[in-house]
Each structure stands twice: as C-alpha cells, then as structure tokens.
Image (spheres, grey):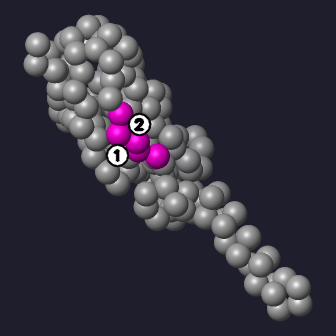
Amino acid sequence: MGPQAKQSWAVAVCVALLLAACGGGTGGPPGPLGEPVIHTDIVPQAFPKNAPVTVQVSQYEQVNVTISEGQTLTITADVSGTTPMTYFWRLDGRLLDGSTDTTLVIQNFSSKDEGVYTFSAGNSYGKAISKFVSVKLAQP
C-alpha cells in the first residue's frame, strides 16, 4: 500500500470513529458539540401476550406499540451529550412525576396508561425531544 493509500485509509478510519463517537449512523445527524442526542436501533417486534414489553424511543422515528392489559411496559432512551443532563418523560404532554431517568417502567399496564409517550434530555447546550411512542391496549 502506497503512502497516499495509507493516508486515505487513515482518514476513512478517523471519520468512521468520529461518526460512531458523535452519534452518526443512528438515524439522524449528531447534534452540535455537547448537545444531547437520542440514539436508536429500532427493530419491529412482536410481543407475547404475557411477556414484558420493551421499546426504545427515537429522536427521528415514531414507535407504535400494542400491549395487553397487565403487561409490564419498559421504554428506554439511549442518550449522549455533555453531562450533567436532565431527563423527563411525558404522557399525552403531561409530565410524569418521578420520571427522571432514561428508563420508564409501567407495571400492570391498563387503560389509564394508554397514550403518547415522549422523552426529553437536556443540558446546558440544549435539549433533545424524542418522537412519540404511541401505546394502546390490545383488543380482547
């Protein structure tokens, strides 16, 4: 491999590492330096009737989930950015009390838990808000 080929290869490796470190390839562009970015690898899933349901929020794609009454719902967020950060979950636009982590767990899901969930992460550089996770009860 000649010197020019080695240099091109080194640049490609550096760009790939930079993209990985900054959130590139995660469904959208990385935010400005330090600004929160919500990452995702959304995979459509089918959930057995009595099994726990786990979904991941996305900054760029909405997620629709149908769940059976009594199941446990876990919604997670994978966030990067400069710390410290604050995290909030909302249901139909209303702030959920005590929901200040990257994971939201709702046990014994019922009709009062149906709706549109969103996640936000913020720091001194800005704020990132997820697209919604729409959760509804399966018809009996």
Q: Secondary structure at mark 1?
A: loop
Magenta residues: mostly which secondary structure? loop
Instruction: Judge from the rendering whether residue 139 lies leftward or rightward of residue 119; answer left or right.
Output: left
Q: Earlier in the sequence, mark 2 or mark 1?
A: 2
* Real-space Cα separation, disc 2 to disc 1, in angstroms: 10 Å
- Residue 128 percent location from the top left of the image: 40, 50
CB atoms of marks 2 and 1 within 8 Å: no
Instruction: Indicate the amino acid at tag 2.
Output: Gln
The x and y percentages for residue 63 are: 28, 41
Residue at 22% x, 27% y: name it: 66
Give how far across and how far down residue 52 sits, in percent.
38, 16
Which residue is the site of mark 2?
A: 56
Q: Is residue 22 above or below residue 90?
A: below
Q: Nearer the viewer, residue 131 or 81?
A: 131
Instruction: Tell me if residue 122 comes above or below residue 68 in the rendering.
Output: below
In this rendering, which labeled residue sits more in front, label 2 or label 1? 2
> Residue beneath label 1, please?
130
Q: Which residues are magenta?
A: 41-45
Q: Quadrant of residue 21?
A: bottom right
Residue plotted at (89% across, 90% down): 2
Above or below 113: residue 77: below
- Nearer to us in this view, 6 or 125: 6
Q: Is residue 46 left or right of residue 39?
A: left
